């Protein structure tokens, strides 16, 4: 009888867990936001794969080299250790001071195959940090940020690119679909505010507060990326780092990545992003991604 009772208890536990799983799945479907439902549509077609870009301050290169890994750090928005990646673009901004930046303050980028982040914690159509810090316009910041998290939708990052830009090249260049084209293609109405707000954000041209973060698709992961296993395609950093033979050899031999340097001069850190974009776009063309 004891064995039967144990089996009955276990079976009851399995049924309860299954019921809770089903209830959670149903709740997600019922409570899905306007934007989440949109990205899940079959009519929203993903573009072909674009690389993922992880950007950080060059000061961190020494620690990354020592660990041979990109390790999540405490995020002050979601209050858990996370690493951030953007589809195709070096959209994350390191701290931008007003004066001339030292070389260790300048941005560096790790460029990975799209599949490098397999199970993202969250996926947003914009920089969630910029959203949390009120850098986004009122027409989108008035909405709950969780309504834009589409991590539960398969291939969501590339579907966002397909929906709002149409192809990878236009996404990288920041050329979103025209309003009439976009709204006509998806038959949008008055209650599609979240969908239209994200599109308007993509079209913003004269708002310095949001720059290229306005529609750069963001992925977050809590996993550590071992750079000897999940190897970067390339590492973009200030030229002096690759003039260091030990570091250059490490990038080439340990990570099997292409070192791509950019020159430095008497500029603030924010002034270097055009040089980084230029080199990344050149790489994508060489890889026949654009």
Image: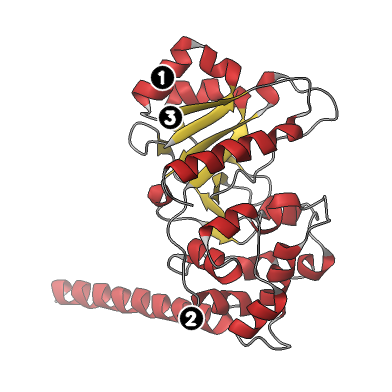
Residues at marks 3 and 1, CA–CA distance in whole angstroms: 11 Å
Say what secondary structure mark 3 lies in: strand
Left or right of 56 on screen, residue 23: left
- Position of residue 186 relative to residue 49, above or below, is below
Name the image quarter holding residue 264: top right
Q: Say if mark 2 contacts mark 1, CB within 8 Å.
A: no
Residue tagged 2: 43
Where does the image place residue 221, in percent across and percent down from the top left? 49, 49
- Position of residue 214 relative to residue 52, above or below, is below
Residue tagged 3: 258
- Position of residue 209 relative to residue 155, above or below, is above
Res 250 label: 1
* Structural crowding at the residue carrying mark 3, measured as other residues with C-alpha within 10 Å and reported as few (<14), some (14–19) or many (≥20): some
Q: Nearer the viewer, mark 2 or mark 1?
A: 2
* Camera-side residue of 4 and 257: 257
Marks 2 and 1, the one that precedes in the sequence: 2
Res 137 label: none
């Amino acid at each position: 009888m004891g064995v039967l009772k144990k089996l009955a208890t276990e079976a009851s536990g399995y049924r309860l867990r299954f019921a809770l799983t089903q209830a959670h799945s149903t709740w997600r479907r019922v409570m899905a936001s306007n934007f989440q439902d949109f990205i899940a549509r079959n009519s929203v077609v993903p573009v072909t794969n674009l690389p993922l870009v992880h950007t950080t301050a060059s000061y961190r290169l020494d620690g990354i080299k020592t660990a041979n890994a990109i390790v999540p750090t405490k995020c002050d928005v979601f209050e858990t250790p996370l690493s951030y990646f953007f589809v195709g673009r070096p959209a994350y901004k390191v701290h931008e001071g007003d004066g001339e930046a030292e070389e260790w303050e300048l941005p560096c980028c790790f460029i990975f195959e799209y599949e490098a982040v397999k199970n993202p914690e969250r996926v947003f159509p914009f920089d969630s940090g910029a959203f949390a810090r009120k850098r986004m316009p009122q027409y989108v910041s008035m909405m709950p940020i969780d309504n834009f998290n589409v991590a539960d939708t398969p291939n969501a990052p590339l579907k966002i690119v397909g929906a709002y830009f149409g192809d990878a090249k236009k996404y990288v260049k920041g050329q979103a679909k025209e309003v009439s084209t976009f709204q006509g293609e998806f038959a949008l109405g008055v209650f599609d505010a979240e969908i239209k707000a994200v599109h308007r954000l993509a079209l913003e041209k004269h708002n310095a507060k949001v720059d290229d973060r306005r529609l750069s698709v963001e992925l977050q992961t809590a996993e550590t990326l071992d750079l000897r296993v999940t190897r970067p395609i390339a590492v973009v950093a200030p030229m002096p780092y690759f003039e260091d033979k030990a570091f250059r050899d490490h990038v080439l031999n340990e990570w099997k990545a292409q070192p791509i340097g950019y020159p430095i001069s008497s500029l603030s850190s924010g002034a270097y992003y055009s040089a980084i974009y230029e080199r990344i776009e050149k790489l994508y063309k060489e890889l026949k991604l654009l």
